[in-house]
C-alpha cells in the first residue's frame, strides 16, 4: 500500500519553514527527518507515525485515534500511530507534526 500523497503534501507544507527537513521513502511510507532524526512519517499502512519519545508515549496513547506503533509484532516505544481521523483538520495535523519536531530537536546530536 502506497502512502497518502495528500497527507504527505500537508505535512511537507507544515515543515517547509524549516531548512533542516529531509524526506526519505522507507518501508512503503514517506519519512520526514528533522536534524537527521525521524520526526514523523506518512505510513504506507495508513495514518501518521509520530515520534514522541518514551516519556510521552503512554500519555499520547490516551489521545483519540492514537495507538501504539508496531513493527513486526513489537511495540516501538516512543512512536505512536495516529489514524486519519486524528488529523483531519490543519490544526490537528499541525499539533501532531509539532509534537514530532519538538521531540527530535531536543535529542542530542550524534557524534561525527
Image (cartoon, rainbow, N blue to C red):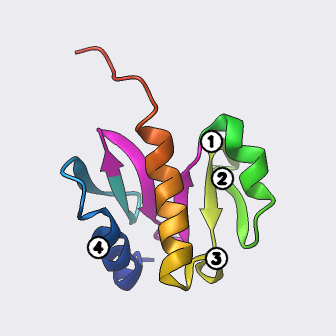
Residue designated by label 4: 13
Position of the C terminus, as image quadrant, is top left
Labelled pair 2, 1 in contact (Cβ < 8 Å): no
- Viewer can see residue 51: yes
- Where residue 20 appears, as percent x and y from the top left, is 22, 47
Q: Quadrant of residue 88?
A: bottom right
Is 110 one of the magenta-colored residues? no
Q: Dominant secondary structure of the magenta stretch?
A: strand
Residue in view at x 70 percent, y 45 percent: 57
What residue does disc 3 label?
86
Of labels 2 and 1, earlier in sequence is: 2
Q: In this figure, which residue is indicated by the disc labeled 1?
A: 78
How crowded pointer 1 is (Cα within 10 Å; few <14, some 14-19, many 20+) is rated as some
83 or 109: nearer the viewer = 109
Select label 2 or label 1 by which is in front.
1
Dot 3 lies on which element?
Answer: helix
> Which residue has dot 2 on it?
70
- Number of numbered discs visible in the structure rendering: 4
Q: Which residues are magenta?
A: 33-52
Amino acid at each position: 500500500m502506497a502512502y497518502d500523497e495528500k497527507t504527505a503534501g500537508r505535512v511537507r507544507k507544515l515543515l517547509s519553514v524549516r531548512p533542516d527537513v529531509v524526506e526519505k521513502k522507507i518501508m512503503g511510507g514517506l519519512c520526514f527527518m528533522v536534524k537527521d532524526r525521524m520526526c514523523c512519517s506518512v505510513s504506507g499502512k495508513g495514518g501518521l507515525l509520530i515520534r514522541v519519545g518514551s516519556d510521552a508515549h503512554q500519555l499520547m496513547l490516551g489521545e483519540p485515534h492514537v495507538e501504539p506503533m508496531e513493527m513486526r509484532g513489537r511495540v516501538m516505544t516512543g512512536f505512536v500511530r495516529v489514524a486519519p481521523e486524528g488529523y483531519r483538520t490543519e490544526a490537528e495535523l499541525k499539533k501532531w507534526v509539532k509534537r514530532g519536531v519538538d521531540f527530535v530537536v531536543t535529542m542530542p546530536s550524534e557524534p561525527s
